[in-house]
Amino acid sequence: MISNFITRVKHAKVASIPIASVSGETKDRALASMAKALDLNREIIISANKKDLATAEKLVDAGKLSKSLLKRLKVDDIKIDEMIAGIKDVIKFENPVGKTLSALELDRGLELYQVSCPIGVIGVIFESRPDVVPQIMALCLKSGNATIFKGGSEAAHSNRAIFDVLVNAIEGTQGMPSGAFALMETREEVNEMLKLDDYINLIIPRGSNEFVKYIQDNTRIPVLGHSSGVCHVYVDKQADLEKAIDICYDAKVQYPAVCNAMETLLVHRDIAGKFLSEIGKRYEGAGVEMRCDDPSFKLLKDKGFLKAILHAKEEDWSTEYNDLILSIKIVDSLDEAIDHINRYGSHHTDAIVTEDKINASKFVSLVDSSSVMWNASTRFSDGFRYGKGAEVGISTNKIHARGPVGMEGLLIYKYVLLGKGDKVADYVGKSAKKFTHKKLSSSFSDKMDGIR
């Protein structure tokens, strides 16, 4: 089984060369075929998903699978419509491969171009969500990358059905290479995949904190992702309280089981009494458990919120709940809020609510997170909402790609130097020629069209 898997990875590595040079028109035809195939094979996909749901429901009853993962597992006509819409959004994008990122004349007739290109072979490991397959496959195809998928065993039937439908559509498109996409189906293959740094160029894990951390700790392959989403909203003393209540409710309650939901609420002492009284009512009505520092606990207790509050422990400040649970802390200053976020947060997404532009500017400058919001919910930190069409994941890395990552996270670049018999020796010694290092307005594609 393992040898068969390694063979498929090697085939994907080979296929990563021709898929990198497929024309934008051909890739768009393959994407359109993918969308059409999903529409025509709804019954097959939903039938496969029902098998996974039946097994998953038993696991939930046995306490071996969370209800939030069960919710993400379900595929119905609405979910398939969303998959199709996501693929069609990717079709609208320009072909990202071969774009000129910079152009520089080193000397007359000696021109250097920085040109976008695919990364190569992407490994995608994810839990529970079958809709990840069309999302990432569409983005990887458009960006010219071969891709190895591994979904959770709880979605095995769904993943296989969707994968087969999509790959048949792609490989049935004239001009598309075969073998560029592969699906792993056993746990053993994951551990083997992590060793294949000679073949796989980037791994994108999507799942629980423990899952992502395991991937990061057990491979030499670069990993794009985040291990947790400990997100904050700071309500400044200059906040518009009506805005603050709406934002803080949305950030926690709208969908608590995701990485961009707020986990800790920080409130300036000067407005804590009035604000916490109001937001406390909203949270209590929504069933939110509030874990409070001593000042906020006393304040809410005095206001009659006895059933919904608990004393916060030290570990609460760095915990991602993914549930209707919220840590609350009262702070004395903007600086204290910033220090708390940078110390306990996961550098994912953090927000400030304030009408003070100076305070907002300081917060945005000093909070070390991949997304920072001013007067907006943390829930906006999402590839689709950021206009990326779809999302390969959210990265808290400080290299290559950061924040909600779309197609740009699947691209790198190469330098192409166009000369006319030029030699470095001519630029060395007493009579050395001088470099001009002048920016050019021409693009690499225009230049190559001119040569051809």
Image: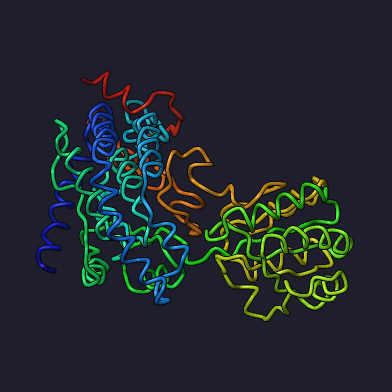
137 vs 71, nearest the viewer: 71
Q: Is residue 388 above or below residue 110?
A: below
Q: What residue do we see at 83% from left, 74% from top?
A: 301
Residue 414 in sight in this render: yes
311 vs 343, nearest the viewer: 311
Residue 59 position, x and y percent, is 36, 72
Q: Is residue 310 above or below residue 158?
A: below
Figure quadrant of the C terminus: top left
Q: Is residue 113 left or right of residue 315?
A: left
Q: What residue do we see at 47% from left, 54% from top?
A: 394
Residue 145 position, x and y percent, is 27, 45
Q: Is residue 187 above or below residue 258?
A: below
Q: What residue do we see at 37% from left, 30% from top?
A: 107
Q: What residue do we see at 45% from left, 51% from top?
A: 401
Res. 189 image quadrant: bottom left
Figure quadrant of the N terminus: bottom left
Number of numbered discs present? Answer: 0
Residue 425 in sight in this render: no
Residue 34 position, x and y percent, is 26, 37
Res. 225 image quadrant: bottom left
Residue 17 position, x and y percent, is 18, 44
